[in-house]
Image (cartoon, coloured by chain):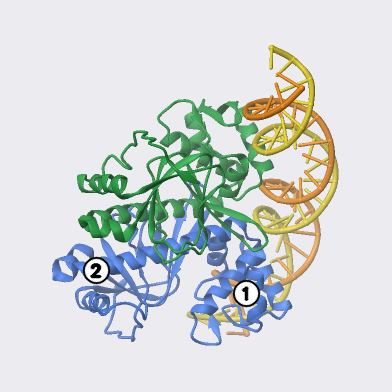
Chain colours: A green, B blue, C orange, D yellow
Amino acid sequence: MSLAYDFDTPVRAVQTSRSVACNETLDLMERMGVRLVFAKDEEVYGQDEAADLIYRVVKGAVRTSRLMSDGRRQIGDFHYQGDLFGLECGDTHAFSAEALGDCVILMVKRSALRASGAAESLDRLIWDTTVRDLRRAQEHVMLLGRKTACERVASFLLNLSDNADDDAIDLPMGRQDMADYLGLTIETVSRMLTQLQGSSVVEFTCARKFRVRNPAALARLAD
Amino acid sequence: MSLAYDFDTPVRAVQTSRSVACNETLDLMERMGVRLVFAKDEEVYGQDEAADLIYRVVKGAVRTSRLMSDGRRQIGDFHYQGDLFGLECGDTHAFSAEALGDCVILMVKRSALRASGAAESLDRLIWDTTVRDLRRAQEHVMLLGRKTACERVASFLLNLSDNADDDAIDLPMGRQDMADYLGLTIETVSRMLTQLQGSSVVEFTCARKFRVRNPAALARLAD
DNA sequence: CGTCATCTTGATTACGCTCAAGCTCCGTGG
DNA sequence: CCACGGAGCTTGAGCGTAATCAAGATGACG
């Protein structure tokens, strides 16, 4: 990782409904924080590390993951441009975070932000993010506990398409990352993608770019 | 469900490390709240219902669950005596909650509690509970995504034994509930229990009561 | 003591994993 | 510009774990 150049991509607000106070905190983060550039697969923070920083994806995307002793990996979530992450709420991180591709991360000490008189708005921001993380984790539990391979992949593509503004959606992660998020193997993910493409539900222009051809069918498959 | 009689079982504090202020909120809940008795499988609240109450398990245990359109069920979590639950943080519940067996639930309107001058301490309580829920959900994701049937069952028994004060631990839920929590079928759960018992890791006196005979082995199997 | 729900066990099936090739795409250097 | 190399992706064949289907056994309760 390395210090970011003056690399000012415009960043959408995390959520349009967010209060003005929270956007002020985001601005404060911009001014007080440090920007770092991470290369693909570089670690932003590690499992069991102390958790006193707040992170924000300025550009690119990040995964949080956890390894079992024998190397099996589970990805907890993906974080995209504008997302806050790393508020694991304990004193240490239960998951590690790595860059999916080259990306720019803004990070600020929580205590410094709080000291700058933004305490209330900061709390609100942390609360909103934690609630979002909990909801997503619960959805993830549903997916992993009771959905078939096909449903998992369909759900995943559907989520991506819901959040995408463009019609041609690109996958910021490789098949292995998808598999480790969905509790499957790369081969199974690949087969399901082929199958979804074969039934004209989605269409892949290349391995990392797709468009939804039949949204209703995709939603039905995702259940 | 019916109004509880004067049924005052002593209730442990939710967490020993909790601040005095929070215990005061718990006391306030006791005084302001309504106690209701629920029979086995009775619904405490439903999926998509409004979420403006706080619930606390006074006696018994509760499950939160979610159904798919075709009837597949996933249990999100179990809540035991002393636990707060139902703070799903949105305006409606993403999961429903049902009694595992006969139980007593204390419930209070969030707004009423806040109006009683306990706002700060209430926020703390809600925060702590939400953080605990998030951590548990993340652990659950790991279990469902990457653990084998045997590891899932072992993890489950290990968790129960960690929280139990007694040596003889009793399961408040049936096999179907375990299965729906672990993302398995009752048959598989039953087979794994038999297997764990066969290898002298645990011992079942009856279907709902067990003791750990080899804690190290159980921990190793749970990974 | 009988009845019914719950749990266990057995036999078979199927979904997704493993192992093993091939293929595609993309960057690199000739 | 094209040939080469390698990582990432796809496809195929066979296998294994957990699901399904189907009986029994156990146990709780009237």
Estimate the x, y position of residue A88 in percent, counting from the top left.
42, 60
Discs 2 and 1 carry the same chain letter: yes
Number of residue marks: 2
Report the disc number at residue B137: none
Estimate the x, y position of residue A120 in percent, counting from the top left.
22, 57
- Does residue A95 appear anywhere in the picture? yes
Depth order, front residue of A20/A215 = A20
Depth order, front residue of B204/B111 = B111
Q: Residue at x 51, y 56 (%)?
A: A96
Q: Quadrant of the N terminus of chain B?
A: bottom left
Determine crowd level at label 2: few under 14, some 14-19, many 20+ residues with C-alpha closer than 10 A: many
Q: Residue at x 66, y 70 (%)?
A: B221
With respect to residue B127, does D3 lie above or below? above
Asked which secondary structure carries label 2, the reply is: helix
Query: Which residue is disc 2 drawn over?
Result: B122
Q: Residue at x 38, y 61 (%)?
A: A52
Cα distance, mark 2 to mark 1? 36 Å
With respect to residue B122, does A20 lie above or below? above
With respect to residue A113, does C5 lie above or below? below
Asked which secondary structure carries label 1, the reply is: helix
Q: In which chain is the residue bearing label 2? A: B
Q: Residue at x 62, y 69 (%)?
A: B222
Residue C29 appears left or right of A85: right
Query: Which residue is disc 1 drawn over?
Result: B219
Estimate the x, y position of residue B104 in percent, counting from the top left.
34, 76
Estimate the x, y position of residue A142 in percent, counting from the top left.
50, 53
Picture quarter containing residue A206? Answer: top right
Depth order, front residue of B61/D21 = B61
Identified by mark 1, the residue type is: Ala
